[in-house]
């Protein structure tokens, strides 16, 4: 399945964006988010970006006040996912211009649209920023 | 406006406030839904999504999604689909309602809308939907717009996962996708092929044959392609595509030498040419190494791969090191030698500050340990144990213990290491581990003195490690006399003077400490009992200590202390018999029986001491068969790998009886076996390993040969079955009470008439009975054999078997030559214990073999005419 979920969480532990590619109930989601966030936030800079949790891995990276967490299967290439997180951030940056947490919060649907263009059903679809952003820009122009 | 709502939520200071705000908003949304307001619908939905992300239930908004999807405008549709994906999942029935809309949208003229539909379908479709819409998706795989194609490809992945039967339809289309130029389509196409291969093996074959070449070519193109701004990431063009291609190549090459051959060049190129100073490059190298490890390969590539991993290991970046450790674990199975070279680095990683790295390194190290490097490695690991932090200690301890056990070449090294581990991290040591330690200690009889002294020293320094205390208490109880008298000093030891007082002090500390738990205290109590027998001068003091627990709140301790007190007061004679040295526990049976715990010292003493025929305090319920089977001491461990019933047989035999060599026991159906087994008159038969003298020396007190019921039960049932003297089936019986067995004095006057057990023209057997004082169940029989013929009998052998409720011991005969015509006789002593004394009388089956006139004679008879009340 590849990617199981993508989360963006701030330093206080509040979820800013959550996209799940496998079905979990609401309680499960909250529990999962709580656990993982606690684990990742507790780690310091020098430590590895990969955490093992249950039967999958979490790859995380911190950008300013926001943590990007991606849960992947055990056979996924962690370094590639790390790159993917960076790609995601760069894409959002290009669209929003100096993206920050508030941008994501107030334009949640746009962030979702972008993510949708990049990942579908747990697999990476598109990696070219131009291709990802063109439908979104089109839609912005239309509305 | 959604912005206002978000601001309002952010302004909340407490969770309760937030809940209030959300509730208000939800109410407003619900009202708006009821009014069926077109304009605000998508705003409502956006708000709902936000609310759902916070964790509140939002199912009332699901119908809104549907309405939005059904509307004509693109933004509405967009939000509708997004809402659909976020708020719903494949299990909801509402999803079925969307199928129609989806179908229409898949055929829409606006390709963005088609894209939307594909996206939604790809993320959450259920099996029925997949079946319905599969033909549409197939068609779209060949659409002119690459964006649509790529989405269709990923959608297909979901479809074939949900409905594997449809996979065949997609094979051809997928193959054509591989020839695309557009990266997006290529990536998804490769994904689709990879998943097809996982789902259907004929797809795998197809791709392997047709597409491997093409894939290799594509990869080469990508690797060699010039700079392309769109897909460039830190100098490498589209690393994701690289990685996906490598993954697919891995799937195709696994298990197939042919395909693997075709890939070797490109893999070598990727491995050598990729720059590794950026993460993207490293990601590709990592994938490449994984692929090399998985495909069939001669070795050149493998060396390359392991070198790359070696470089990774010394990289400063933690992520890279982690990844390298991961891969090395796989590499160990393929090429252990190469990995051994990096052992030092891996050892450093175990001590790293990062928890993930530590864990991985420890796992890897565990796989690398072999006989050569085990000693220094364990030394390092134990040193690290002292400084490691709590969460890691548990893991580390478990690994160290299992390593030490696996590779323990000499007992003394094993004991040393285990003592160190116990002193450091005893609280993390699992029960089976210290049980095993005790078994080993009891087997290493020459090390008893050393062990108990070392334990005593350790005990003085680290009393907070519970397990250490337990093991120490057990040993002090068992081998207290060795401790005090400095028995068995090894050269490497420093002399230490421990007085009896010190030993008793130590055990007292264990009882009195408030942190000792129930098990420890119970073990300490019984250790005290043992000490009271070993150090008779301290009986009074020990009694005082025990008495203090008489009123203990815990039933177990109370019971023990009361019973032990009674033993000390009222039954001093039995005390020594009770607490004599533990028989050596059989390692082989123990390790086979690991799951069931071995409560060696933990026991509940049964009632009156006289009911304990064994020198061992029997553990209460279930373990009885265990312990009794385990008490096969004399038989050196390896021998008990013989037949099962032999194990039982031997398992029965207790301390004083150096049972006839288990070693040559295997169920050979021959009388030789019997003769060996029943080698009467041979106090020290052939043994492998453990010498009888050890056992004898360890038994200091006056011991009566004891047997237990269960073992004999199995034993004599065998004998009951093996009858006809015609065949040489071993009439396995005899439990010889061989040995130096100081038998109990046969006092007790003649209360019973003697019995002519058997008489024929050639032989007469007479039994004289006497009772053992104090135990009415036990009868001592003196058998006298008289030769009534005129020929001398040589190699005279008498064997007997008894049914289950009896126990039998046979002492050596006075000789095995029976002079003719009653000129002399052979006497032999038997001891029979009747568990059904009073209810059933004795019965015995005897077999007599001898040589006369150069011919072998065998006679067998059942004796039923024993006096009734024996």
Image (cartoon, rainbow, N blue to C red):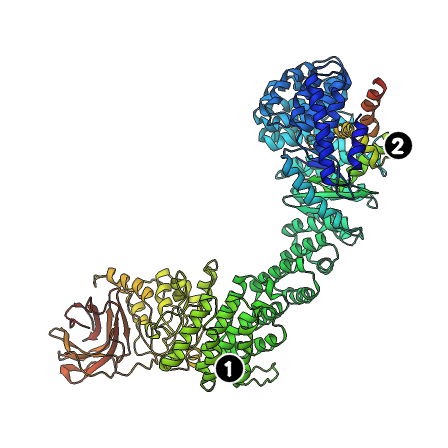
Q: Position of residue B4 (x, y in %)?
A: 81, 29
Q: Nearer the viewer, residue B587 or A90?
A: A90
| Residue B258, visible in the rendered structure | no
Determine the residue positioned at 63% across, 44% down.
A55
Determine the residue positioned at 37% across, 69% down.
B606
Q: What subunit carries mark 2? A: A
Q: Could you tell me which quadrant the N terminus of chain A lies in? A: top right
Q: Position of residue A47 (x, y in %)?
A: 77, 51
Q: Which mark is residue A97?
A: 2
Q: Which mark is residue B692?
A: none
Instruction: Answer few, some or many: residues within 10 Å of disc 1's Cα (few below 14, many 20 plus, some between 14 and 19).
Output: many
**Quarter-of-image position of residue B146:** top right
Give the SS element for disc 2: loop
Q: Position of residue B535 (x, y in %)?
A: 47, 84
Residue farthest to the right? Answer: A97
Q: Is residue B222 above or below residue B797?
A: above
- Residue that carries the numbered disc 1 in the rendered image: B482
Q: Nearer the viewer, residue B450 or B303?
A: B450
Q: Could you tell me which quadrant the C terminus of chain A lies in? A: top right
| Residue B660, visible in the rendered structure | yes
Residue farthest to the left? Answer: B761
**Quarter-of-image position of residue A125:** top right
Instruction: Answer few, some or many: residues within 10 Å of disc 2's Cα (few below 14, many 20 plus, some between 14 and 19).
Output: few
Give the SS element for disc 1: helix
Q: Position of residue B853 (x, y in %)?
A: 18, 76
């Amino acid at each position: 399945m590849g990617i199981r979920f993508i989360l963006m969480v701030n330093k206080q532990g509040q979820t800013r964006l959550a996209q799940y590619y496998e079905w979990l109930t609401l309680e499960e989601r909250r529990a999962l988010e709580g656990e993982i966030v606690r684990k990742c936030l507790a780690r310091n800079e020098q430590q590895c970006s990969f955490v093992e949790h249950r039967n999958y891995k979490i790859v995380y990276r911190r950008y300013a006040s926001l943590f990007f967490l991606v849960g992947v299967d055990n056979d996924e290439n962690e370094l590639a996912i790390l790159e993917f997180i960076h790609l995601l951030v760069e894409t959002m940056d290009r669209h929003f211009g100096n993206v920050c947490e508030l941008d994501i919060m107030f334009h949640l649907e746009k962030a979702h649209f972008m993510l949708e263009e990049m990942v579908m059903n747990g697999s990476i679809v598109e990696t070219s920023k131009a291709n990802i952003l063109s439908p979104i820009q089109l839609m912005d122009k239309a509305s | 406006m959604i912005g206002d709502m978000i601001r309002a939520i952010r302004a909340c200071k407490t969770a309760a406030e937030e809940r209030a705000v959300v509730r208000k908003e939800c109410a407003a949304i619900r009202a708006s839904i009821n009014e069926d307001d077109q304009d605000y619908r998508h705003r409502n939905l956006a708000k709902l999504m936000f609310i759902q992300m916070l964790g509140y239930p939002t199912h009332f908004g699901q119908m809104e999604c549907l309405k939005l999807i059904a509307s004509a405008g693109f933004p509405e549709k967009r939000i509708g689909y997004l809402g659909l994906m976020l708020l719903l999942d494949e299990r909801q029935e509402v999803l079925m309602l969307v199928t129609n809309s989806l179908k229409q949208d898949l055929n829409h003229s606006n390709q963005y809308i088609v894209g939307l539909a594909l996206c939604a379908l790809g993320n959450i479709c259920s099996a029925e939907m997949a079946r319905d819409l599969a033909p549409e998706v197939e068609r779209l795989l060949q659409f002119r717009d690459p964006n649509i194609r790529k989405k269709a490809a990923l959608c297909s992945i979901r479809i074939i996962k949900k409905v594997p039967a449809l996979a065949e339809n997609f094979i051809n289309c997928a193959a054509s996708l591989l020839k695309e130029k557009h990266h997006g389509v290529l990536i998804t196409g490769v994904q689709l092929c990879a998943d097809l291969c996982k789902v259907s093996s004929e797809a795998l074959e197809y791709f392997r044959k047709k597409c491997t070449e093409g894939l290799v070519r594509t990869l080469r193109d990508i690797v060699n392609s010039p700079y392309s701004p769109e897909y460039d990431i830190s100098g490498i063009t589209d690393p994701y595509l690289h990685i996906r291609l490598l993954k697919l190549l891995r799937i195709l090459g696994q298990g197939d030498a042919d395909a693997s051959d075709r890939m070797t060049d490109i893999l070598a190129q990727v491995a050598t040419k990729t720059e590794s100073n950026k993460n993207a490059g490293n990601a590709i190298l990592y994938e490449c190494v994984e692929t090399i490890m998985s495909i069939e390969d001669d070795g050149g590539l493998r060396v390359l791969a392991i070198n790359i991993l070696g470089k990774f290991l010394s990289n400063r970046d933690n992520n890279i090191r982690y990844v390298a450790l991961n891969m090395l674990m796989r590499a160990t199975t393929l090429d252990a030698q190469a990995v051994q070279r990096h052992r030092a680095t891996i050892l450093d990683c175990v001590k790293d500050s990062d928890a993930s790295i530590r864990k991985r390194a420890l796992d890897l190290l565990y796989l690398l340990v072999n006989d050569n490097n085990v000693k220094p490695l364990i030394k390092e690991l134990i040193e690290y144990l002292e400084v490691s932090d709590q969460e890691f200690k548990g893991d580390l301890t478990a690994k160290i213990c299992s390593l030490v056990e696996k590779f323990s070449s000499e007992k003394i090294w094993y004991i040393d290491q285990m003592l160190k581990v116990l002193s450091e991290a005893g609280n993390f040591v699992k029960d089976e581990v210290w049980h095993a330690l005790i078994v080993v200690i009891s087997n290493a009889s020459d090390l008893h003195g050393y062990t108990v002294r070392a334990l005593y020293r350790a005990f003085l320094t680290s009393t907070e490690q519970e397990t250490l205390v337990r093991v120490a208490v057990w040993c002090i109880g068992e081998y207290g006399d060795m401790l005090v008298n400095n028995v068995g000093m090894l050269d490497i030891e420093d002399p230490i003077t421990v007085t009896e007082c010190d030993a008793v002090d130590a055990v007292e500390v264990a009882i009195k400490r408030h942190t000792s738990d129930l098990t420890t205290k119970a073990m300490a109590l019984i250790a005290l009992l043992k000490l009271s027998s070993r150090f008779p001068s301290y009986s009074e003091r020990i009694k005082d200590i025990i008495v203090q627990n008489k009123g203990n709140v815990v039933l177990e301790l109370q019971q023990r202390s009361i019973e032990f007190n009674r033993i000390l007061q009222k039954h001093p004679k039995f005390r020594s018999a009770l607490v004599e040295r533990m028989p050596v526990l059989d390692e082989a049976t123990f390790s086979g029986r690991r799951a069931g715990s071995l409560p060696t010292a933990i026991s509940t003493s049964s009632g009156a001491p006289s009911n304990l025929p064994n020198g061992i305090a029997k553990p209460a319920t279930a373990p009885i068969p265990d312990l009794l089977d385990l008490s096969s001491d004399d038989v050196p461990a390896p021998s008990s790998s013989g037949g099962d019933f032999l194990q039982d047989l031997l398992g029965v035999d207790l301390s004083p009886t150096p049972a006839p060599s288990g070693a040559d026991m295997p169920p050979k159906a021959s009388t030789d076996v019997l003769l060996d087994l029943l080698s009467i008159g041979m106090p020290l038969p052939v043994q492998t390993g453990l010498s009888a003298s050890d056992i004898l020396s360890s038994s200091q007190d006056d011991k009566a040969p004891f047997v237990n019921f269960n073992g004999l039960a199995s034993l004599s049932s065998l004998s009951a079955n093996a009858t006809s003297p015609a065949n040489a089936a071993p009439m396995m019986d005899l439990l010889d009470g061989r040995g130096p067995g100081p038998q109990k004095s046969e006092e007790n006057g003649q209360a019973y008439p003697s019995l002519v057990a058997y008489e024929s023209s050639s032989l007469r057997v007479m039994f004289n009975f006497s009772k053992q004082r104090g135990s009415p169940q036990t009868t001592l029989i003196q058998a006298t054999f008289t030769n009534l013929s005129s020929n001398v009998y040589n190699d005279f052998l008498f064997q007997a078997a008894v049914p289950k409720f009896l126990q039998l011991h046979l002492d050596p005969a006075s000789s095995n030559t029976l002079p003719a015509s009653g000129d002399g006789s052979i006497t032999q002593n038997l001891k029979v214990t009747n568990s059904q004394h009073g209810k059933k009388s004795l019965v015995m089956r005897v077999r007599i073999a001898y040589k006369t006139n150069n011919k072998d004679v065998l006679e067998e008879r059942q004796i039923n005419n024993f006096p009734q009340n024996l």
